[in-house]
Image (spheres, helix red, strand yellow):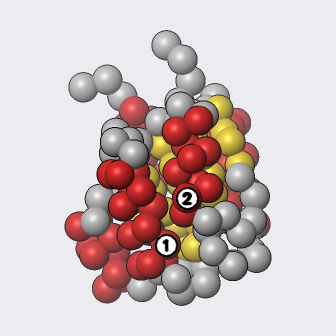
Amino acid sequence: MAPTRIVIAKPGLDGHDRGAKVIARALRDAGMEIIYTGLHQTPEQIVETAIQEDADIVGLSVLSGAHMTLFAKVMELLTERDARDILVFGGGIIPKSDISLLRDMGVARIFTPGTKTQEVVDWVNDAMAPA
């Protein structure tokens, strides 16, 4: 079985990527293929990369407070491109009150500050386990 392919992206103008890099490294160390897109990606660039790279999952890191807009746009573009089979998870400074709204838009999971990297690895493994 091929390793899980994950695009880790920093959408918007947020310039803080330490958390995204820590998660990317933990997932890579757990045997997954990671495509890190770097800072300041547009939702269009993220979705294009996910499709071109045949990603199983997209992980979005948002610390800027623009998570509702950015996540919504990524989900909308995945739908338009008939790519909703790509799971999306997110992390960052996201208020608890927004997590259920993000889940309603199709975001599979939100990780907030203080989450252990092993929790993210375990979630990805569970999400990708054969049914």
Depicted 53 relative to depicted 91: above or below: above
Q: Secondary structure at mark 2?
A: helix
Looking at the figure, which quarter contains the C terminus? top left
Q: Is residue 37 left or right of residue 100?
A: right
Q: Residues within 10 Å of mark 1 (few under 14, many from 20)?
A: some
Q: How many marks?
A: 2
Q: Residues within 10 Å of mark 2 (few under 14, many from 20)?
A: some
Depicted 109 relative to depicted 85: above or below: below
Q: Secondary structure at mark 1?
A: helix
* Residue 30 visible somewhere in the drawing: no
- What residue lies at 34% left-to-right and 42% top-to-bottom? 82
Residue 63 location (% of width, % of height): 61, 79
Of badges 2 and 1, nearer the viewer stands 2
- What residue lies at 68% left-to-right and 42% top-to-bottom? 35
- What residue lies at 36% left-to-right and 28% top-to-bottom? 129
Q: Disc 2 or 1, which lies upstream in sequence?
A: 2
- What residue lies at 56% left-to-right and 24% top-to-bottom? 3
* Residue 101 visible somewhere in the drawing: yes
The amino acid type, in three-letter code, at marker 2 is: Glu
Which mark, by number, is residue 44? 2
User: In this figure, which residue is indicated by the disc labeled 1?
Assistant: 70
